[in-house]
Each structure stands twice: as C-alpha cells, then as structure tokens.
Amino acid sequence: MDFYSASLPILGVYAGINILINLFLAYRVSANRVRSNVMTGTGADDKLYNASRAHITNVEYTPIALAGLVVLHLLAASIYVLHIVGLTLTIGRILHAIGVSRTGESTPPRLVGTLLTWISLLVAGIACLWYALV
C-alpha cells in the first residue's frame, strides 16, 4: 500500500467514528423528546436543551472538519496530519458533548472539547492551503 492509499482507511475511521457520535447525540435528543413529551423546541426541559445543544454543535462543526479530511486525503497529505486533525476533532467532539450534556454552564470538558475542535479546524485549514499551494 503506498502512502496515498494508506490515508483512505484513516479517513474512513474518523468519518465512521464521528458519524456514530452524531447518531448517538441524535438518539439522546429523541429519547429526551419522548421522555419530556416535547416534540418541537426544548420547552423548559434542561436535559432536552442540553442534549439538543450537544447535537446541534456537533452538526455545526463535524461536517466541515470531515470535508477538510477528505480534501487533505485528495491532496495526498501526510497520514500524520490526517491523524492530528481526526484525533483532535474526535476527542474534541466527545469532550464537548460530555460537557454540554451535563449542564448549560461552562465546564472543563466543554472548554477543552471546543478548543480541540477549533485546533482540528485550524490545522485542517492551514494544511489544506499548504498542500494545495506548496
């Protein structure tokens, strides 16, 4: 397997894990909707609100990061760059979801999760420009 083809399974792992994270977060919203009998919005239910925020922010950040991973693969980026972006994204999204799911307040997992997610996007963006222009 050459260097370029080795990156496709890496992309598949991070895409698969993050798709499953998103599905889990969507399930938590649905389960809280059934529990609270609130089918639209979040009402005054804090657990539903927190589950919804965890899912919404995951949907805001994950697709663009995964798109960055796809572009990096197409640009034959180093597998190390793919792992840096993929790992920081995945760990960041898990920590953020844990932090937001517990409370609407700021928590260490939420803060670290946000920072890791932003780092993954920053690295992906810079790496895309680097591999495209250099």
Image: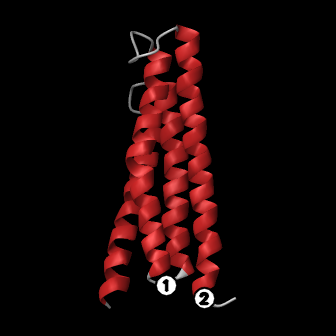
4 is higher (above) or lower (below) than 36? below
Which structural element holds mark 2? helix
Give the percent coordinates (x, y) of residue 106: 39, 32
- Mark 1: few, some, or many residues within 10 Å (few <14, many ≥20)? some
Tell me residue 12's x, y (percent): 62, 65
Identify the disc placed on residue 9. Answer: none
Q: Is residue 3 left or right of residue 115?
A: right
Quarter holding the N terminus?
bottom right
Locate residue 79: give its quadrant: bottom right
Q: Let me know if residue 20 appears in the view.
A: yes
Asked whether, in this view, residue 12 is left or right of residue 73, the answer is: right
Which of these two is toward me, 11 or 46?
A: 11
Residue at 31%, 78% in the rendered image: 129
Q: Which residue is mark 2?
A: 3
Q: Are the residues at dot 2 and dot 1 in contact (C-beta closer than 8 Å)? A: yes
Measuring from the top left, give residue 6's x and y in whole percent.
64, 81
The percent coordinates of residue 13 (x first, y second) are 64, 62
Q: Name the residue at 45% across, 25% down.
A: 50
- Asked if residue 111 shows in the view, the reply is no
Quick one: 53 or 100, which is closer to the camera?
Answer: 53
* Front position in the image: 70 or 53: 70
- Disc 1 element: loop
- Check the image and name the residue furthest to the right: 1
Q: Residue at x 33, y 74 (%)?
A: 126
> Badge 2, how many Cα within 10 Å: few under 14, some, many 20+?
few
Q: Residue at x 45, y 12 (%)?
A: 45
- Indicate the colouring scheme: secondary structure
**Residue that carries the numbered disc 1 in the rendered image:** 76
Q: Earlier in the sequence, mark 2 or mark 1?
A: 2
User: Looking at the picture, does residue 116 appear above or below residue 60?
Assistant: below
Q: Amino acid at mark 2?
A: Phe
